[in-house]
Amino acid sequence: MELLKNCPSCNSIEFKTNFTGCDYFLSKEEFTIMECIDCGLRFTNPRPAFDDIIKYYNSTEYISHDTSKKGLVTWLYKAARNFMLRKKFSIVSNYSKGKRILDIGCGTAEFLNFCKKHGFEAFGVELNEKPREAGKKNYGLDIREKTPDFQNENFKFDCITLWHVLEHIHNLSELVNSIKELLKPDGVLIIALPNSSSWDAVHYKKYWAAYDLPRHLYHFNKNSFRKFAGNHQLKIVKILPQVLDSFYISLLSEKYMGGTQNLIKAGFKGAISNLMAGKHESGHSSLIYILFPEIS
């Protein structure tokens, strides 16, 4: 295990234990979430080292990499993903000034293929070999194992996206610095993240599925992400909701809390979360941040 002595966002050494949670999805091991006193970032600490964390993904149940499994949760995931392909593309089209896109953590590359079909020059990064090779084989896309592979060839992109990826990355600063090198001066960065201050996160507490310990290393909310972005000279120009995520996350959270999937109850809780997000600053279960590099 890897014990962090500094906050991954602001480098502070002042943090406190927030709570101890569990990997309800796979290992059933317990992990501690710390909170930085200075910037408010919550992060898993200690955490599996980079070379060890792959075992926490090795399950056919991990459907972001393997959607061949049948069942209600998988069906809902696929339905939401298909809806979000169009939503994501709409966001990219609205904010990108050009048509060269890099999707980091692209998985099996359905989103990149959608962009390619609609006139974009699409590229991807995917660490996991199985989905990476599937995306290359199925769609004929240029997908690399690591972001520096594109830096070494002096690529520049109009848009870089990370859809629920940043929370998995061990070396945050290293990745953000790579992204800033790869973005054109007027390029846009789009990052989607779970929101640990959402109504459903507060309601489900340690059972909230989007903590996803230990695969999620960081647990941002609006305030901690604003500070993280500022630390890296990135300006947030818009925050958009992912309204479907509350239903999917609530369904998993109900299972973790009670042992069974309860579609009606999860739907009710997801709807409440979205309703409360409209009334309070805390926001929706998942948020999409639109960022531009600050010009010095």
Image (spheres, helix red, strand yellow):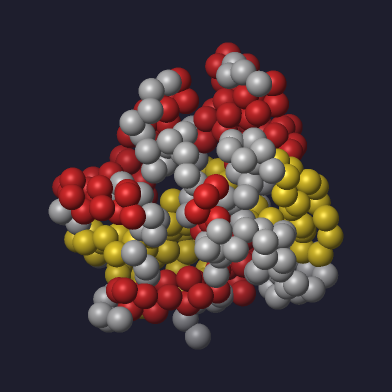
Instruction: Look at 39% across and 59% down and name the residue there.
Output: 127
- The percent position of residue 245, horizontal first and vertical second, equals 52, 35
Does residue 197 show up?
no
Which residue is rendered at x = 58% and y = 29% of the image?
A: 252
Observer-nearest residue: 231 or 69? 69
Query: Quick check: can you spot residue 73?
Result: yes
On the picture, is 230 further left or further right than 66?
right
Q: How many numbered markers are drawn?
A: 0
In the image, taking residue 276 as reference, residue 157 lies left or right, namely left
In the rendered structure, the answer to whether residue 164 lies left or right of residue 195 reads: left
Quadrant in the rendering for residue 125: bottom left
Image spot of residue 119 (x, y percent): 16, 54
Q: Residue furthest bottom?
A: 296
Is 42 or 222 nearer to us in this picture? 42
Q: Residue furthest top?
A: 264
> What residue is drawn where x is 55% and y is 55%?
53
Residue 12 placed where, x, y %? 76, 74
Task: Pinpoint residue 188: horizontal percent, then vertical percent.
Answer: 39, 65
Residue displayed at 21% across by 61% down: 142
